[in-house]
Amino acid sequence: MVSSKSKLADIRGKAEDVQWATVSAIMTLLGKMSRCLFAAVFVMAAVFYADAAELSPVGTYLWFPGRIGANADQECRELVARVRPSGEKAEMSFWGAVPDGAQFEESFYLILTESRMEATYAAEGDYSSGAVEIGETKAGKTSFKLMPDDHPGLTIQGEIVAKPGKEIIAVTIRGIPVDGGKVDRTTYFCRFEEPESAI
């Protein structure tokens, strides 16, 4: 005849087995959930950075007067630190209101919106300002079509190269009519962050 103590011990043993099995199942489930969560976060991050790398180049940029070389990004940072460009200064430049004592590099900007390209340095008859149609951005390169204000009916192709992580952007306007022929013209600009207190 089995004693009550033996039955109790047997019940406790089975209960412990059930508890361990439950704990093991929960740990396995948590492990699977954590792997799924990690995968989801990884995919979201990849999508975010892929989108960030393909952002439209719409914005305001400071004209870069130097030559493009190995130190161009650093020279851009130094220029921005010295000039302290801003959207307000760009707007003043657009309207021809240059502050007294401003250096020439402080006066020139490229203002690019979804529908307009405005080069504040453009002279009458130039091909740098007008209505624009911005194409798709791939690998930091964006094609566009420019309809210059001073040349009605003319459409010029171009490309903007704005690589992620680079200070310099390049704007190339292709097929500009010159002396009976056509030439490509590339102008360089610097990215900048809007200062806390402009001007």
Image (cartoon, rainbow, N blue to C red):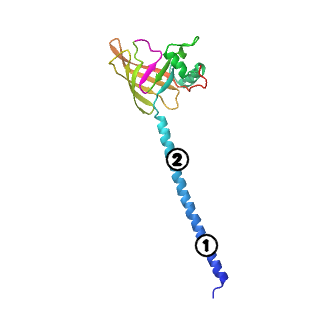
Measured as percent of width and height from the top left, residue 199 is found at 59, 19
- Look at the image and give the residue range highlighted in magenta: 114-124
Measured as percent of width and height from the top left, residue 176 is found at 37, 17
Q: Residues within 10 Å of mark 1 (few under 14, many from 20)?
A: few
Quadrant in which the N terminus is drawn: bottom right
Residue drawn where x is 43% and y is 30% of the image: 141
Residue drawn where x is 61% and y is 73% of the image: 15
SS for callout 1 = helix
Q: List the residue tagged with mark 2.
A: 41
Q: Vertically, is 1 above or below 50?
A: below
At label 1, the amino acid type is Ala
Numbered badge on residue 15: 1
Measured as percent of width and height from the top left, residue 194 is found at 56, 26
Question: How far, Cα to Cα, is label 2 from label 1?
Answer: 38 Å
Residue sitting nearer the eye, 180 or 150: 150
Residue 25 visible in the picture = yes
Is residue 117 covered in magenta? yes
Tally the marks. 2
SS for callout 2 = helix
Is residue 41 covered in magenta? no
Numbered badge on residue 190: none
Q: Vertically, is 180 above or below 3?
A: above
User: In terms of image quadrants, where is residue 192?
Assistant: top right
Prevailing secondary structure of the magenta residues: loop
Residue sitting nearer the eye, 197 or 43: 197
Q: Taking 111 as reference, is 20 left or right?
A: right
Residue sitting nearer the eye, 66 or 142: 142
Q: Are marks 2 and 1 in contact (CB under 8 Å)?
A: no
